[in-house]
Amino acid sequence: MNGTNGSSKLDPVPTWIDAAPRPIAKDRLFDVISSKTGQVVHQAQSASVDEALAAAESSYKAWINGWKDELYEKRRDLLHRVADIYERRIAEFAQFQVEETSCAPEFAEFNVRYTVQHLRETASVLAAIRGSVPRTTDQNVFSVTIKEPIGPVMTIVPWNGALILSTRAVSNAIAAGCTVVLKASELCPRTHHAIVEAFTEAGCPPGVLNQIQCRRQEAAEVTEALIASPYIRKVEFIGSQGVGRIIGQICAKHLKPILMELGGKGPAIVLDDADLPKAAAMCAAGATLHHGQICFSTERIFVHRKIYEPFLQHLTKAFQDMQGAGYAVNVQGATHAYDFLKDAQDKGAKFLVGGPQYVDGDKTKARLRPSLLTNTTPEMLLWDDETFGPSASVFAFEDDAEVILKANDSKYGLNAAVHTTSWERGLRFSKALDYGQVQINGPTTFDRVSLPIGGVKGSGWGNANSSWGLEEFVVEKTVNFHATAGDASIFTAK
């Protein structure tokens, strides 16, 4: 077994605690399978509850014994060294993603380069964590607030955006002075172990970053055991709304704060003054990027009645011109999207492009044709749930007030887009839409490392990226300095 010395050979992927792999138990190995080839890529060690709890205890010891008080410039420099390693190993880290998640090589390489940007942005804003000197009503009391790391964090990370989302979660917490137990996705443990490799090579102390992964049938037991551990102080979850609801309930049960980025049902609104070819291209790309497996994907497209027909011509052509949209991460993901499309077809939806169809020649049934629908209705599965496939539904509207109501009529609130040549009109819409991010003349999939990212309603709570992400992992403490001599009464209010 290799890996942490810079070699890409690592089979099986181990559980990693205190900067070392745990002994491999052959009866606890599981297969990681490529949806593109249907073949086993490698195996990974499934962590037991005892191993998970050992990872939590290790993280706590590393935090209490030094990392919580580490100088910010040491943490800053660590992130820069990690970014240097990512840059040196771009081809390897991209290949891990391609092998495990069947994403396009271009998407995988973008993920690595974008992750480097995130690491350097986070490092650049570390000094922004600062307290305050609030006024008090007492002449003999001087008060300050200081921000301290909350403690060991359990991060539960997804397979889509496999490197950027997981590195973002890990690096924000570590940069803020926390330690991390990384629960890697069982679909891409090698990709997630690359993060551990980079941090270890960069000089991250033992216990500051531990990694576990487990078989799906054991995930619930291991996850609750970790959340319940007294060593874990906070949880970050990135994933579906359904699983997020379960994780949130467990956190509430054990009184653990949680940061969540969940799914979306992203609307794109095309107003009657929009640049139609550009808007059509943005909508098509937003719906199909990475086989539609992005929480920011464009799933609903609302078009003003005046331009409905000409816009539909542009949009239909944009979908028809696509050679494909890549692969689902596994057959189950493709089947989920297929079933949603088939349900819509059976209940009266009209397909302008595609349908519940796999791409010709796709032997593994993990690759769907891009699809564009109309006539969708509330009784259909895809009405207000993520298809997580390369498809979008189109609707016509008559006026601004109507479309705002329709776009907001969702349990989700992550990302939205408005296409218009009027800056003022776009601003009005951005204020009226119940979404964490609103793109004016851009795709719903837009994100930048220097901007906060977060959802409202059923898309989660809290923020990621830059200084906003760091603030999620600190707590504010008030310290009051009282006079050393004088009146001892505590009842001084007048």
Image (spheres, rainbow, N blue to C red):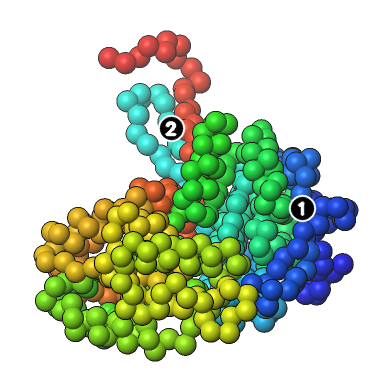
Task: Name the residue rendered at 77%, 53% in the picture.
Answer: 46
Q: Amino acid at mark 1?
A: Ser
Residue 135 lies, with reference to residue 130, above or below; the image says: above
Name the spot of residue 346 as percent of width and height, x first.
Answer: 37, 64
Identify which residue, 70 or 362, lies in the foreground: 362
Q: Which mark is residue 361?
A: none
Disc 1, SS: loop
Circles 1 and 2 in contact, beta carbons < 8 Å: no
Q: Which mark is residue 143?
A: 2
Task: Name the residue rendered at 35%, 25% in the picture.
Answer: 139
Name the spot of residue 77 as percent of width and height, x first.
Answer: 64, 64
Disc 2, SS: strand
Q: Amino acid at mark 2?
A: Ser
Task: Name the residue rendered at 64%, 72% in the picture.
Answer: 35
Q: Residues within 10 Å of mark 2 (few under 14, many from 20)?
A: some
Q: Quadrant of residue 407?
A: bottom left
Residue 391 lies, with reference to residue 145, above or below; the image says: below
The tag earlier along the polypeptide, 1 or 2, is 1
The answer to whether one can see residue 19 in this image is no
Residue 424 lies, with reference to residue 247, above or below; the image says: below
Alpha-carbon distance for marks 1 and 2? 49 Å
The residue pinned by badge 1 equals 46
Q: Residues within 10 Å of mark 1 (few under 14, many from 20)?
A: many
Name the spot of residue 419 as percent of width and height, x first.
Answer: 23, 74
Nearest-to-viewer mark from 1 and 2: 1
